[in-house]
Image (spheres, grey):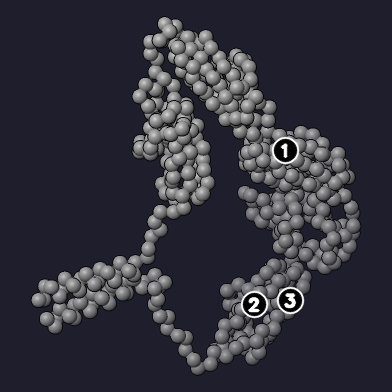
Amino acid sequence: MTGNRLGLILIAIASICALSAPAGAVGGDMGWYTIHCNINGASVYFDGSYMGQTAGGVLSVGVYSTGTPYSQVSVQKSGYYTATTNLPATPSAGETANVYVTLNPMPTTSPTGTDTGGLYITTSPTGARIHLNSVYQGVSPLSLSGLRTGTYTVEAEMDGYEASTTSVYVSGGYTQNVFLSMVSPGSVSVTSNPTDAYVAVNGKTVGKTPYVITGLSSGDHEITVSKNGYYNYKKTVNVVEGAQLSVYAVLDPITTSNEILVTSEPPGAKIFLDGVYVGETMDGASYPVQNVATGQHQIKLTLAGYPEYITYVTMTGAQISVFAEMGTTPSVTTGSIAVSSTPQGAMIYIDDVYTGVLTPYTKTDVSPGEHTIMLRLSGYQDTYSKITVYAGQTATLTMGLASTGSGESPTPVPTQSSPGFAILLCASAIFAAYILIKKE
């Protein structure tokens, strides 16, 4: 009796632990590989795993977007050479990735007694120039005959598209079908105001606006538009194969009123005015931060591989110049913070460091920039605030302290979302089992 009850208890414990364990994600959304082959009834394998046979020259294979990705596809059929190629990246849910594979027959005795064969070459798009072993043959679709048995390199090229190349084996007495797909590179259409501005791609000048940049590979490219009497316009664009992006550059005229002229060594540093990004320093020219309000401002420059450069300026009109030698620390004067509280006598902490003084108090020699102030007084809640200190100025801060009262903080109660809930539940079940067995 005791053994039966113990077995039931252990089953219950296992069930509770299983229910309390977090459920793992199973499966995932499905995408599709569509395998196109010139031969029907060819067997398709992904990384050695059989996936099915082509019908009508096509086989669609579903794959989970969250599953382990496949890397290679092999297509086989008796009497043909096995063709193997790399698979593209796993398609996203609901998306389809097309893969084209050509099976070439193994050499056999020609039924016509000849050792020559032929090729029928098609392309997408049609009208591509076809080269056989680097010799021009014509435009697609194209039939070639009288080719001696052996391996040939077929290349298709067309203006505005990337060339496509494949190898094919020609057997005597047979005509092989060859299909080549070409991809159109990306392009960027650049216009500007004013027009007739120079356009550069990744630092290389290519023309004047309006201008269409063609033949760009996929990925990021930096577009710069420049014209005498205007500040440079710079933008990074992400080019996609077969797509055209548009860039409209509004060039700001160079002016000399109420602005901060910023240069750096080396150039290319990002400029922040009072924490707001405004542009990048240029090579051989100052970057103008315009329409700056009267008063004191923080200028910060950042550049990969260098520490931040921070300085403070007081704008009174006209122009101010700032030169930042990245990697050095500019001389900065200090400011002050006048802190008071209700009630008084609270300990003052600046950036988590106790100052050793109580409110009210004016703390001098505080570095410019943003600081966190915390006040602590027995019987009151710790109170926090942020304040910005400017060089040569005193920032004023008044803080009210809230009484802690007599209530106590509630003790956290574990829930199913708590990390230790499953362990706690299992431990409770085991303890209950131990009590029951003890009673037996």
Of badges 3 and 2, the one in the foreground is 2
Which residue matches tag 3? 395
Task: For marks 1 and 2, give the CA distance.
Answer: 47 Å
**The quadrant where residue 143 appears:** top right
Circle nearer the viewer, 1 or 2: 1
- Image point 54% across, 19% down: which residue? 120
Point out the tag, 1 or 3, that comes first from the N-terminus. Answer: 1
Toward the top, the furthest residue is 113
Whether 344 is drawn above or below 412: the answer is below
Q: Quadrant of residue 16?
A: bottom left
Question: According to the image, label 2 marks what residue?
Answer: 385
Residue 432, visible in the rendered structure? yes
In this view of the protein, which residue sits in the foreground, 185 or 37? Answer: 37
Horizontally, is 40 left or right of 182 in the view? left
Counting other residues with Cα less than 10 Å from the Cα at mark 3, is it few (<14), some (14-19), or many (20 or more)? some
Q: Which mark is residue 201?
A: 1
| Amino acid type at image mark 2 | Ser
Q: Position of residue 88 (x, y in %)?
A: 50, 38
Which residue is painted at 35% across and 37% down in the image? 50
Give whichever of 436, 131 is nearer the camera: 131
In primary-sequence order, the first of circles 1 and 2 is: 1
Q: Quadrant of the C terminus?
A: bottom left
**Residue 200, horizontal then vertical, whole percent:** 75, 38
* 422 left or right of 376 in image: left
Q: Quadrant of the N terminus?
A: bottom left
Nearer the N terminus, badge 3 or badge 2? 2
Residue depicted at 73% across the width and 55% down the height: 271
Disc 3 from disc 2: Cα separation: 13 Å
Quarter assignment of residue 134: top right
